[in-house]
């Protein structure tokens, strides 16, 4: 009995944490909605500055990585250890690709003098300043979550390699997966709100 | 004995690779739709359309990738409660801002 693991309890704990994350980003989306209402033209102008192609690529990268994380759990359940490791490595690789794209995207913005406290934003339209303030806050916080998710997936990867995660006990992998899916989930809303408002 | 205690209590749901790939296909299709649709100006419908597609994608991720469909009542109910709270937070704030 003392070795019995409360799998449901472990999962509920993770979900409660995820709820707090949902509310955190929800609050930022409320901020976005309120300022969008105040400065609709600036938000449209700001959205047009963003690269829709890079945004779409990053969306696809995260969707595919979510799939591979889910598949790595199936692989563990089926005792296909090597396949599971492969799926996890690919997912972490997707996280790296996402961050590299973000780096080039932010770099291009800096190049166009669009960053917090830049002259163009300070002297220009206040709505545009707010739009890019929100853009950097939300995509930055999301990027931080991508990094944390990659760390969690890497820990799971090591555990799988060392047989600490097996078909009987894979709560760590499941919870890391849940976190990674949450990162994907948030991006699903960030992408249309910032990149696709006409 | 301990193992049987754990496994009889938790019925594990295994999703096949094919099914997961099918969900991924749906998500990619919805992404193409939302990007394609964004090149057309639908006027005030722009944001509702984008959010509707995003919510559909989120539903797919939550139900299948995140297994909510196969979870017990506690996770389902607590998740829905969170969504209700989020909806209250967003809608009440927005009503205040919109009709001030």
Image: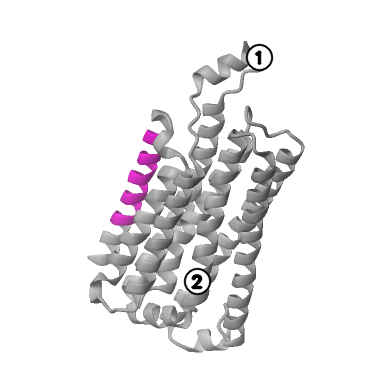
Magenta stretch, overall SS: helix
Work out whether A38 lies above or below B16: below
Point 67% across, 32% down: residue: A166
- Both labels 2 and 1 in a single chain: yes
For disc 2, the marked residue is: A55
Q: Position of residue B65 (x, y in %)?
A: 47, 45
Work out whether A16 lies above or below B22: above
For disc 1, the marked residue is: A2
Residue A113, picture quadrant? bottom right
Q: Would residue A65 be visible to someone looking at this image?
A: yes
- Is A14 placed left or right of B83 in the picture? right
Tell me the magenta residue range. Answer: B76-92
Q: Position of residue A96 (x, y in %)?
A: 66, 63
Name the residue at the front extreme. B18
Point 63% across, 79% down: residue: A107
- Is B71 placed left or right of A3 in the picture? left
Quarter of the picture holding the N terminus of chain A = top right
Few, some or many residues within 10 Å of mark 1 (<14, 14–19, 20+)? few
């Amino acid at each position: 009995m003392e070795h019995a693991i409360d799998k449901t309890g472990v999962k509920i704990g993770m979900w409660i944490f995820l709820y707090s994350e949902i509310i955190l980003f929800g609050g930022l989306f409320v901020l976005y909605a309120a300022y969008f209402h105040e400065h609709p033209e600036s938000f449209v102008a700001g959205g047009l500055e963003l690269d829709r192609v890079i945004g779409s690529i990053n969306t696809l990268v995260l969707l595919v990585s979510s799939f591979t994380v889910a598949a790595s759990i199936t692989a563990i359940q089926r005792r296909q250890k090597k396949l599971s490791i492969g799926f996890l490595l690919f997912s972490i690789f997707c996280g790296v690709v996402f961050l590299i794209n973000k780096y080039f995207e932010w770099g291009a913005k800096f190049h166009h003098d669009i960053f917090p406290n830049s002259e163009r934003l300070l002297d220009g339209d206040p709505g545009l300043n707010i739009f890019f303030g929100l853009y950097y806050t939300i995509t930055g916080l999301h990027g931080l979550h991508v990094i944390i998710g990659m760390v969690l997936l890497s820990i799971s990867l090591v555990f799988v390699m060392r047989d600490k995660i097996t078909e009987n006990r894979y709560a760590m992998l499941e919870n890391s997966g849940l976190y990674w899916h949450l990162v994907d989930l948030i991006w699903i809303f960030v992408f249309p709100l910032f990149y696709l408002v006409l | 004995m301990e193992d049987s205690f754990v496994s009889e209590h938790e019925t594990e749901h295994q999703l096949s690779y094919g099914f997961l790939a099918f969900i991924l296909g749906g998500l990619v299709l919805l992404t193409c739709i939302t990007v394609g649709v964004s090149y057309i100006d639908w006027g005030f419908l722009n944001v509702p359309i984008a959010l509707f597609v995003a919510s559909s994608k989120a539903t797919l991720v939550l139900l299948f990738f995140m297994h909510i469909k196969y979870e017990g009542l506690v996770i389902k109910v607590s998740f829905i409660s969170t969504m209700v709270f989020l909806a209250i937070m967003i809608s009440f704030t927005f009503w205040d801002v919109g009709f001030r």
